[in-house]
Image (spheres, rainbow, N blue to C red):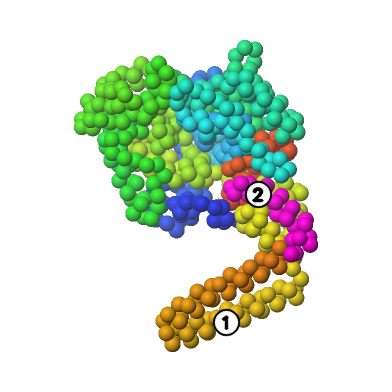
Amino acid sequence: MNVECFPVTVLPHVSQIYRDYLAMDEHETVRQWYGAEAFAGKWIGKGVPVGHADALADLLGRQAIEFGAGDAAKANIEKLRAGARAVVTGQQVVLFGGPLLTILKAATAVARAKDATKATGVEHVPVFWMATEDHDLEEVDQVSLLTKTSVETLRAGLKVAHAVPVGGVVPGPEMAAVLDRVSELLEFAPVSDWLRECYEPAGEARPTLALAFGRLITKIFAEQGLVVMDAASREFHALGAKTLRCAIEYAVELQDALIQRSEELVAAGYHAQVLVAKGGSMLFLLDEVTGERVALRRVASEGKDGQWKAGARVYSTAELLKILETQPERLSPNALLRPVFQDTLLPTAAYVGGPAEIAYFAQSAVLYEAILGRITPVLPRLSATLLEPAIATVMDKDEVQLPDAMTTSEALAQRLGARAMPIEGKRKLAAVGNAVEVELAALTEYLAGMDESLGRAAKVSGSKMRYQMNRLRRMAATFELQKEASLLKHAQAITLNVFPGGHPQERVVAGVWFMARYGDGLVEKLVGVAGNQCPGHVVVRL
């Protein structure tokens, strides 16, 4: 296995704030919004202990049993009890573990925990936070796997009457057919059995999405001792009540600070990842009867006795505080407050996030400072494209690098056809093209000197000539493609594996697809790659 490191700009649609974050030492403005530079190692040794280590370990221990954790994870929970720090990452409970990026995140957390333990002598434990309180069921009810010719996206078709937290959703009998198809696509590899163990009912009890996902991630990272947690319960919310209370009692001040930060981001040429508006809040309330997760909004913002609205129901601040005291699990943090709530529970040294998470950490920083008095450092997850040997061989034969493959199969095929053209043909096309450019430039300048309208007409005619010249190049390349049909097949295979559906592989193809082909040893290999800390995007040749 070898590794190539590319700039993150090889990926499409990378936000400017993420680019500048990766080069934080060159951007003073960005540096002030984050707890530490991404690759300087200055985050190491900054973990903050919590005063409820025993209670935390007890809760994690009970969940570890539910998730079927092995000795390594249980030992790490005891390390947390004894004062270890946590390197945290997380993801929504996507069907069957979701895309490859889920595994990349967890592998990065494992690698960074190892780094910090070695550097400080203080134990650091990798923790995976399952985002079970989100309510977008459609987003998590899918998994995409590769066939020989396409991306096949499977859905269980899960339905709920209300927008309830996805972690508690229980799949029905429809899951059996999906598991059958997944097993076929994974060619009945051992990981297929893992999926059945995690998602099929044991006896009469059907597992929730949270339980199934937790079992799967625990199995995948059993050797690395990854501690998997679901903080949706009453007990966890009671431990984090301080942050939820602040979000209620200081809602106006915190919302104003977020709005100001959003304006600072825009003024600096960036974007605000999460829209923040007057009258909003950082909390959702779960309906006591239906369990629906409804956004809380402030309808009277002055003083601590203001009024709040969730759906059609109005609450006073005193009523919300009473709910927090007696039913804390009904109050759910939004995307900006969640990391602060998380780090109220855990002794977090650093959080490992993807580009979007890192973008909104610039906003969350004001909540960290106001509620916890510190900013938790956020580190980039491993970003990677995994190349199977057959695809790597084809790319090498056709002299295709990763940036070349980030396109459509048609565009790549045209490029391969152009490369396959005889040298003499390339020279003649280049010579004519260069001559046309030189003569057109001279003619346009001459005519423009005679008359402005003649100059404009020359530019229009010139663009038509260039179009025809490019058309001739494409026709020549297409002719070569027709002569050598394998080039089109090569282009289709490369883009399917590297850039499926016009998206980076890590965001589309399920992590279990790669595990089916390369076994659970793949995880430790990715932990090793994450340890190299490429400040961009990695190509891993399997």
Assess whether residue 483 is covered by the magenta stretch: yes
| Span highlighted in magenta in the image | 479-504
* Count of numbered circles in the view: 2
Q: Residue 379's spot in the image, x, y percent?
A: 50, 44
Q: Is residue 162 visible?
A: yes
Looking at the picture, tell me which residue is in the foreground, 218 or 112. 218
Q: Residue 535's spot in the image, x, y percent?
A: 55, 52
Q: Residue 278's spot in the image, x, y percent?
A: 28, 39
Q: CA distance from mark 1 to mark 2?
A: 39 Å
Question: Image point 48% across, 54% down: which residue?
Answer: 19
Q: Which residue is mark 1?
A: 438
Amino acid type, label 1: Val
Magenta stretch, overall SS: helix
Looking at the picture, tell me which residue is in the foreground, 11 or 369. 11
For residue 162, the mark is none
Q: Which residue is mark 2?
A: 498
Assess whether residue 526 is covered by the magenta stretch: no
